[in-house]
Amino acid sequence: MFTSPYDALDIPDVGVYEYLFASLDDSDLDRVALIDPQTGSETTYGELRGQVEAFAGALAHRGVEVGTVVAMLCPNVPAFATVFHGVLRLGAVATTINSLYTAHEIEEQLRDSAATWIVTISPLLEHAAEAARAVGIPDERIIVLDGADGYSDLRSLLAEGRTAPAVSFDPATHVAVLPYSSGTTGMAKGVMLSHRNLVANVEQCRIAIDLGRDDRVLAVLPFFHIYGMTVLLNLALRQRASLVTMPRFDLVEFLRNIQDHRCTFLFIAPPVAVALAKHPVVDDFDTSSVHTVFSGAAPLDGETARATARRLRARVLQGYGMSELSPVSHATPFDRDDVPESAVGVLLPNVEAKLVDVDSGDEIDDHGADGLTAPGEIWVKGPNVMLGYLNRPDATAETIDADGFLHTGDIGVHHVDGYFAIVDRLKELIKYKGYQIAPAELEALLLSHPKVADAAVIGVSDDDGQEVPKAFVVAVAGADLTEDDVAGFVAEQVAPHKKVRRVEFIDAIPKSASGKILRKDLRAREKAAAAR
């Protein structure tokens, strides 16, 4: 078993609201918490706390109480923080919904989570209202933050000036948030995260991620996803940093916000790193304020990380986690130069891990001459491990064993110096003639080609029914690149069994809001093509 290099932490036994806001002192109140680049408006920490209290009071007046499930269909705008923490202040449960969902997908989450309220914005109201009607949520329980005829809005609710009531719940067992797993390998499930889970993970992240009160964080990763919720929103608020919110990713706007607001800390997913490393428009903007880029949500290959670091003249660090871990279990320490760019760092405080052979079930702990263990599935235990999946005791039991270790489904290796690297997702390994092939390895290699803008690899069946690697490639605009060029480039650099045997050029790689490649969409595309 592997343990964290950090000393164990005492996790505060409090709810998220008390953890983040009760410790505000006079010097914090006038600090800027949130910046809306679309309007230029700023919200101080004192104003934010007042808004959270007033919103919680308005909800309580309307019957929201401990345990009420409130759905949030909202992109990254400053009001998200007010609503999210207002819900948690009451001991209610926030279930956050992907802003890109269709009405049907929203309805499914509302129904599964048993939400009785929904908060949204006017551009998303049509889908939200349709889904709400389908599950029986009346209009008076739909809040449209920026206003719409017939619905309550944030401004009027805050203007009521109501006081939030005192509430009581056990932070260790009471569900605070109910995000849904990404569904990249199956049906999405509600992930029950307690107040203690969220508080613990922010405390753990504070040790390895040196985000400070003078930092400005560009918040483009969605708050509705656990990465954005914990590592951007909650960590930044706890550190009294400033958040510059972006409702959606646009590279030019992203760069302009860095330049105009002098952003210092970027939390991103690998597709953004690819753009920062390769897109020519980056040179048109002043990014000199950035000192740290932190990548998570999916593996980032070392070459792209190094290229991003050179381009921005900033350090690029990685972390690892999943919704079920609140989400971070590993991070590259800011004060260690010996961890490779391709690694995901060390275990956070209070976290233990095992590597387990996927075939034999034996624990792996021996290191080879190169300092690395053999690959194995990563099992993680700590105060950030979820309570379980909502109404899915079967799935919970399959994921968390009797000893409290969460089986991540990710294959990794451990280095004798204490850091981990991710090989790939267990369910995404391609088996060719008995050999296991990691799609992430081939994707990292493809991204090193100067004419490849993005890439994804899945296993497909050849004419003999054998699973072989197929690459989906997005070529750099105007590049002269053929299928043979791609296949030959890979073949020159890998063992014969790892060769890419099929190549298809597409306009964009399908990805989730958190940046994970949606391989199920590529498999569906392949199946549809085979049926024609």
Image (cartoon, rainbow, N blue to C red):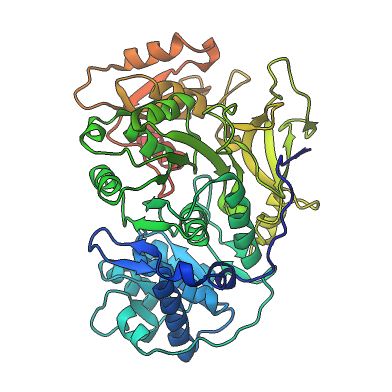
- The x, y position of residue 466, in whole percent, is 53, 22
- The residue under the point 47% across, 76% down is 86
- Residue 22 position by quadrant: bottom right
- Residue 480 position by quadrant: top left
- The residue under the point 59% across, 86% down is 166
- Residue 411 position by quadrant: top right
* Quadrant containing the C terminus in the rendered view: top left
- The x, y position of residue 325, in whole percent, is 62, 52
| Residue 80 seen by the camera | yes
- The residue under the point 39% across, 21% down is 448
- The x, y position of residue 302, in whole percent, is 48, 26
| Residue 110 seen by the camera | no
**Is residue 259 shown above or below 458?**
below
- The x, y position of residue 293, in whole percent, is 43, 40
- The tally of labels here is 0
Q: Is residue 267 left or right of residue 349?
A: left
